[in-house]
Amino acid sequence: MTETETASAPRATAARGGDPLERIYADVLRRNPGETEFHQAVREVLETLGPVLARRPELAEARILERVCEPERQIVFRVPWTDDAGRVHVNRGFRIEFSSTLGPYKGGLRFHPSVNLGIVKFLGFEQIFKNALTGLPIGGGKGGSDFDPKNRSDAEVMRFCQSFMTELHRSLGEYTDVPAGDIGVGAREIGYLFGQYKRITNRHESGVLTGKGVGWGGARGRTEATGYGCVLFTEEMLRSRGTGLDGRSVVVSGSGNVALYAIEKAQQLGATVLTCSDSDGYVLDRKGVDVELLKEIKEAGRGRVSDYAEARGGDCRYVPGGRIWEVPCEVALPCATQNELTEDDAVGLVRGGVLAVAEGANMPTTPAAVRALREAGVAFGPGKAANAGGVAVSALEMQQNASRDSWEFAHTEERLTGIMRHIHDSCHTTAERYGSPGDYVVGANIAGFEPVADAMLAQGLV
Ligand code: NDP
Ligand code: 2IT
């Protein structure tokens, strides 16, 4: 990503006295040096909130934005562990407890070598507004580590998770802070983390983590929720333009939890998904990705998309190191990681006739790419709305645990469908209310911000 595409460059120092939003942004830059992804996420939200502050001066008086940009608590800790050969490793753990305004801190854990404070803070900041959009009582948080689970044995991953939880457990609790998965944290990691929490605390506190195995408190449908929700949101965007996914060509990036179930749901709705990818390359499968085969290779075997292409055979093609967005399509769903879809990619997608782009991943589209898509009139679903299905079903899992019940898949799926429609509609009507019809970025940011701001006003200066 080039410097001009990040949020940290423009007008960073311009703004002491003048525009209050620029002043707030300048303070965020000054107080959080080097945290480029956090700067980017803050800027994207601030850029859309001018009309809210203009209508509601009490928010500026109470310094709601300054407060919302400052995490309530930041926890950074050492995670020592030994590999199978007995060698000692030292990783860094993070948990950013960003906002407990609407409920316990809620958000995933990411294990990836790229994880640093700025990345966890960007994810935690996004999570505040995403969680508010669901309409469910959850605050915002995020955590993780620069640990790389790739090519580690189950025993190594278990020792790492046990060490991580040995430190983090004191900050968690079903009424305090409730992590879940994200990149590199799936069912296996949640199992080890839960086991260690249970052992240390001597409490079977189901609601302290979500994404658990269905046999021990997990919600049926949580695995599918983010990908399914992203596609349901896309379908709603297309419907509001008088069309739908049926018969459409779709490009999905990634091949992890979100991507797999975005592919599955898009195909259930009659689309053909042409691609999937990982950090080594992408697969072009013009007949449509065989999602059962892909799941077998990825979920069961921890394989690569190149293994999929080989197993699939025929004219399925693996493109090592290629740019997935060069594949023309009507719908694009970036489901891998932040800043994976650049301005050049967006211009190419527009040229190829793309109708809709929805972010399954968090902040996968660079600011310049978002601009290019919005200016071209493409329906653009920002992550905090489009990928909120995962955390929404996490909140349902917390409900299920609190009621000591076990719900059917159909129950969760029906609720997820209703929640994604509600998120779509509230983004849509909020954008209209603030004079930007059809702009889901404006709609999501304002509809996510207002309930948090109102509750902060009500709760006093905390
Ligand atoms: P997984 O670990 O299951 O899968 C991640 C996928 O993205 C893999 O295919 C991985 O490829 C690829 N990827 C990760 N990092 C990079 C990178 N730096 N460059 C290229 N490819 C990369 O994670 P999830 O599917 O859970 O998460 C994907 C995205 O969705 C993230 O942005 C996450 O924050 C977001 N998200 C996840 C939710 C959830 O419920 N899981 C909810 C909402 C958003 P490789 O194997 O090569 O690393
Ligand atoms: O980014 C996200 O919303 C997640 N990784 C899911 C968070 C959760 O608590 O389910």
Image (cartoon, rainbow, N blue to C red):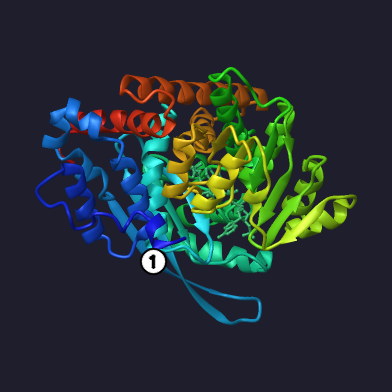
Determine whether 57 is above or below 40 in the image. above
Determine whether 75 is above or below 218 in the image. below
Q: Is mark 1 within 8 Å of ligand 2?
A: no
Determine whether 43 is above or below 59 in the image. below
- Disc 1 secondary structure class: strand
Give me the residue at 53% from left, 19% from top.
Answer: 240
Give me the residue at 45% from left, 45% from top.
Answer: 107
Give me the residue at 57% from left, 40% from top.
Answer: 350
- Identified by mark 1, the residue type is Phe
Q: Please rate how many residues cluster around mark 1, counting C-alpha atoms within 10 Å: few if below 14, some from 14 to 19, many from 20.
A: some
User: x%, y% of residue 237?
Assistant: 54, 25
In this view of the protein, which residue sits in the foreground, 418 or 267?
267
User: x%, y% of residue 459?
Assistant: 20, 32
Pointer 1 residue: 77
Res 37 quadrant in image? bottom left
Res 432 quadrant in image? top left
